[in-house]
Amino acid sequence: MPLTIATWNINSVRLRIGLVEKLAAEYQPDVICLQETKTPDDRFPLKEAAKFGYPHAAIHGQKGYHGVAILSKHPFEDVSRQGFCDMGDARHISVVLGREAGLAAPLTIHNFYIPAGGDIPDPELNDKFRHKLAFLDEAIAWEHLHPIDPAARSVLVGDLNIAPLETDVWSHKQLLDVVSHTPIEVERLARLQAAGGWVDVMRHFVPPQEKLYTWWSYRAADWSASNKGRRLDHVWATPALAPTARAMTVLRDARGWERPSDHVPVVVTFDA
């Protein structure tokens, strides 16, 4: 059966739940993975999500910062949350979909919000950057991201806050010393991807030599005209699942919606 998954850094779900509803109405994803929800669990707009078709929700939030959530049309077989760096941050949640979701075999979805890392790309001078690198090191070592079974069906999505390829940023030369595209971050992300044999599904549809962005800064006077974007949002799949990806869309127009997030949704459909 086709399974459509959307991932979106919503930058405050309570402020922008109407935009999530717009995404749901226009694209009808089976699963919506959100990052930077910025709300404790008891204030998450669950009733609103259920009203527009997502009665099942796995949430991991905190007041004012970070936070991840997975909204689904289908029930979950399992939900888990992983902490990193002993910070108490809500930056990961995963679910398992199975027979009740109409799938012949279980499928795990990991939803991540990796730390942004601040402005100075030096772990000695910037605690936020040191935290980002430590977070990546722990994720690389986390065995649950190392599927051993060649038939394992898993997806890893989220705002990974790293644009790894030269074509994932508007200017490779100008951003080499800018957090999100520095060599040390790119190397860490490559190690995380290699540790699980993860396949970059977005680049299956848009070749690596072509520009691809999912984020445009609020600071730009005209984000569309300047088009100084970065690809900070990613969809990875295990080798067994990746070949079943049949469609991918980056919803660039969402950056121009009323009171938008600075990120846009990415929607991928698998024959799951």
Image: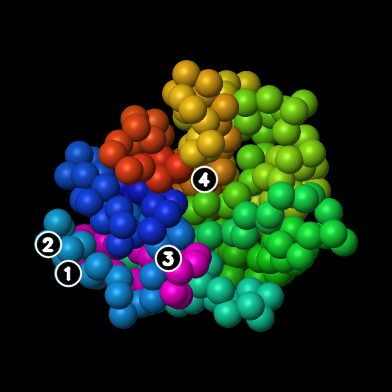
Graded by Cα atoms within 10 Å as few (under 14), some (14 to 19) or many (20 or more), the crowding at tag 2 reads few
- Measured Cα–Cα span from mark 1 to mark 2: 6 Å
Which of pointers 4 and 1 indicates the residue nearer the eye?
A: 1
Which of pointers 4 and 3 indicates the residue nearer the eye?
A: 3
Where, by quadrant of the figure, is residue 87 drawn?
Answer: bottom right
Whether pointer 4 and pointer 3 mark residues with C-beta atoms closer than 8 Å, the reply is no
Whether pointer 1 and pointer 2 mark residues with C-beta atoms closer than 8 Å, the reply is yes
Q: For the residue labelled by badge 4, is the local secondary structure a helix, a strand or a loop?
A: strand
Graded by Cα atoms within 10 Å as few (under 14), some (14 to 19) or many (20 or more), the crowding at tag 4 reads many
Identity, as a three-letter code, of the amino acid under mark 1: Lys
- Measured Cα–Cα span from mark 3 to mark 1: 17 Å
Where is residue 15? Give x, y as percent: 31, 57
Identity, as a three-letter code, of the amino acid under mark 4: Asp
Which of pointers 3 and 1 indicates the residue nearer the eye?
A: 3
Q: Which of pointers 2 and 4 lies earlier in the amino acid sequence?
A: 2
| Circle 3 residue | 38
Where is residue 270? Give x, y as percent: 36, 45
Q: Residue 226 carries which label?
A: none
| Circle 4 residue | 233
Whether pointer 2 and pointer 4 mark residues with C-beta atoms closer than 8 Å, the reply is no
Q: Give the range drawn in magenta.
A: 54-74
